[in-house]
Image (spheres, helix red, strand yellow):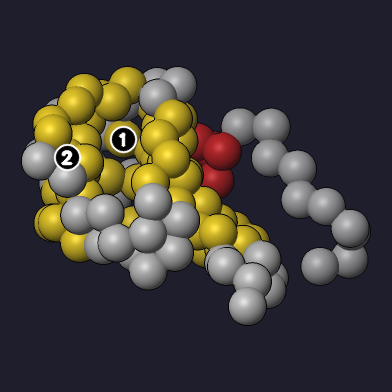
Amino acid sequence: MAEPYLLLTDPAQQVEIPRDGILSRTLYQDQHVKVVLFGFDQGQDLPEHTASMPALLHFVQGEAELTLGAEKRPATAGTWVYMTPNLPHSVVAKTPVVMLLILLRQQG
């Protein structure tokens, strides 16, 4: 990267939501963090899985159902979630959704 920063004034403009699908695009990564932008069409889901590192979810637009462990929670534009490593989670898009995933790489 030529600049010592990455500035996105509107992350939703960085992804075109695919029809009947999910698109993920890595926006930035280094030894400390990985930032991935997701676009979900309505009805698409990311099945239950875990991450081996702490993670943040930030919902930029749309409505989704988020499962965190055994709890189901609504997620709308502005929803922000911190997840500890190995927390089972899933996402189901109720409308077209744009979501940022930030993976925090633990330093050894």
Q: Residue at x 89, y 58 (%)?
A: 4
Residue 98: give x, y in percent of width and height.
39, 38
Residue 68: give x, y in percent of width and height.
21, 41
Residue 23: give x, y in percent of width and height.
34, 57
Task: From the image, state whether disc 1 or disc 2 is nearer to you.
Answer: 2
| Residue type, mark 2 in image | Thr
Observer able to see residue 36: no
Q: Residue at x 21, y 36 (%)?
A: 66
Q: Is residue 96 left or right of residue 48?
A: right
The residue carrying pointer 2 sits among few (fewer than 14), some (14 to 19) or many (20 or more) residues within 10 Å by Cα, namely some
Task: Name the residue furthest bottom.
Answer: 108
Q: Residue at x 27, y 45 (%)?
A: 40
Disc 1 marks which residue? 97
Task: Name the residue furthest front.
Answer: 108
Above or below residue 86? Residue 62 is above
| Residue type, mark 1 in image | Val
Residue 93: give x, y in percent of width and height.
19, 36
In the structure shown, which secondary structural element does the residue marked by tag 1 occupy? strand
Q: Residue at x 46, y 45 (%)?
A: 56
In the structure shown, which secondary structural element does the residue marked by tag 2 occupy? strand
Instruction: Name the mark on residue 64.
Output: none
Above or below residue 90? Residue 78 is above
Marks 1 and 2 close (CB-CB < 8 Å): no
Quadrant placement of the N terminus: bottom right
Q: Is residue 103 left or right of residue 65?
A: right
Above or below residue 58? Residue 55 is below
Disc 2 marks which residue? 67
Above or below residue 105? Residue 96 is above
Observer-nearest residue: 81 or 91? 81
